[in-house]
Amino acid sequence: MAMQGPYDQETKRYVDVRPQYPDQWFSKLSALTSRHALAWDVGTGNGQAAVAVAEHYERVVATDVSEPMLKQGIPHPRVQYLHTPSSLSEDETVAMLGGENSVDLITVATAIHWFDIPKFYSVAKRVLRKPGGVIAVWTYTDLIGINPEVEQVSRRLREACKSYWKPGVQYVFEEYRNLPFPFESVGLGCEGQPVQLDMPREMSFESFLSCQRTSSALARAKQNGVDLLTDDVMKEFETAWGGSDLVRTVNYKVFMLAGTVKA
């Protein structure tokens, strides 16, 4: 469903440092669907959401445009990883998933902004079970609760990255408030009004830096011969963090939309 894999060049590092989504999110989503036979995790990456979904569904199809990412997929007996190149037609995608009216839950974890969104929604509306099927999309944005000094350096780096972001990333900066979402609300946000969730975690300074390094904009800048995460910037981050040995409690802001096909 995406045009290309934005993290192909940073696959291993991405897998190592990206946050784990809380189990209770998937319990809540599972409680919203009438059946639990089949789920589809789209833009799955290494499957971190797919394996959590699999605790609640008999089978999960986890798809991604990036073959390098899929090779990092977390093994699970109920998860099937499938490559979906952008050349795959809508009808082929529907057939691959088992046909129309076959999917109980669709999840898109921090990925829909990379998609051909109209094409994806067209497929989603066809494959979602009617009634009773649910689609949920979410993204996380900035780390908050570190300290003002780190946030100041982060803002400067983000500003420097602006010309290297692909257009869809604007939806993330807008916290999915302007993301099209033509589905009927199930109580977890609606078009224009995503629900905000928290995702706290313990983080070392090295993990924080690794998160910065996996930015698709930084990778794109580097491909163009521009290094935005310079030694000086990393030193600024280290000073602002409070030293390289310090482990901090941080919090990701998460914005979620969930819905069902309108009758």
Image: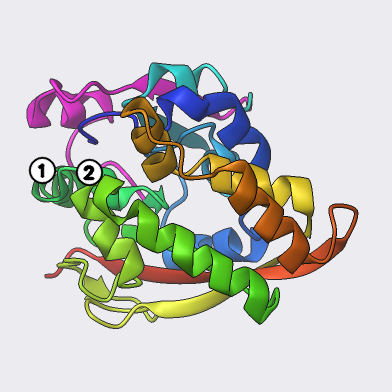
In space, the residues marked 1 and 2 are separated at their CA atoms by 8 Å
Quadrant of res 97: top left
113 within the magenta span? no
Relative to 27, say whether 73 is above or below.
Answer: above
Query: Which mark is drawn over residue 161?
Result: none
The residue carrying pointer 2 sits among few (fewer than 14), some (14 to 19) or many (20 or more) residues within 10 Å by Cα, namely: some
Quadrant of res 178: bottom left
Query: Which mark is drawn over residue 115?
Result: 2
Q: What element carries label 1?
A: helix
- Residue at x-position 47% and y-position 79%: 196
Relative to 198, say whether 221 is above or below.
Answer: above
Q: Give the colour scheme of this rendering.
A: rainbow
Task: Residue lying at the far right in this picture: please name it.
Answer: 245
Q: Nearer the viewer, residue 135 or 153?
A: 153
**Residue 219 placement, left or right of 113:** right
Which portion, as a residue range, is magenta? 76-104
Task: Residue lying at the far front in this picture: please name it.
Answer: 232
| Residue 29: percent from left, percent from top | 49, 64
83 within the magenta span? yes
